[in-house]
Amino acid sequence: MTYVVLDNCINCKYTDCVEVCPVDCFYEGENMLVIHPDECIDCGVCEPECPADAIRPDTEPDMEKWVEFNRKYSEMWPVIITRKDPLPTADEMDGKPNKIEMFSEEPGEGG
């Protein structure tokens, strides 16, 4: 099992999760985070930390596409281990439908 970040992170990018991760498996894009599925140790401490409810175990239905999505971008983006402020749009974007249409492949700053 592993945990993955879903599209509700897009344009929110809360980073509370990165501070509790014991293995530093979060990677930062311009407008979301992802988890490297091969680095995640399945501890689950990140899931309750996400205010946007965007982290899920891969054991839920239809998670295969999110495992591959997280894998792809974690191999392209820098690691993030330090909490940062969420994006300015976080409150208004939390829970919006079709957020994948707003996804940016650009890397974040990491750190």
Image (spheres, rainbow, N blue to C red):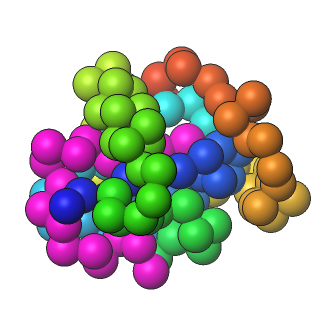
44 is higher (above) or lower (below) than 10: below
Indicate left or right for 98 with 6 as reference. Answer: right
74 is higher (above) or lower (below) than 83: above
In the rendered image, the quadrant that contains the N terminus is bottom left
Question: Which one is nearer the viewer's eye here, 98 or 23?
Answer: 98
| One can see residue 74 in this view | no
**Residue at the right extreme, as displayed:** 92
Q: Residue at x 29, y 77 (%)?
A: 45
* Residue 10 percent across, percent down from the top left: 65, 44
Q: Which residues are magenta?
A: 32-48
Q: Residue at x 65, y 53 (%)?
A: 8
* Residue 102 percent across, percent down from the top left: 74, 30
Magenta region, main secondary structure: loop
Q: Quadrant of residue 74?
A: top left
Question: Which one is nearer the viewer's eye here, 52 or 110?
Answer: 52
Q: Quadrant of residue 18?
A: bottom left
| One can see residue 93 in this view | yes
- Residue 20 falls inside the magenta stretch: no
Q: Residue at x 41, y 64 (%)?
A: 60
32 is higher (above) or lower (below) than 19: above
98 is higher (above) or lower (below) than 59: above
In the rendered image, the quadrant that contains the C terminus is top left
Q: Residue at x 12, y 62 (%)?
A: 41
* Residue 48 percent across, percent down from the top left: 44, 80
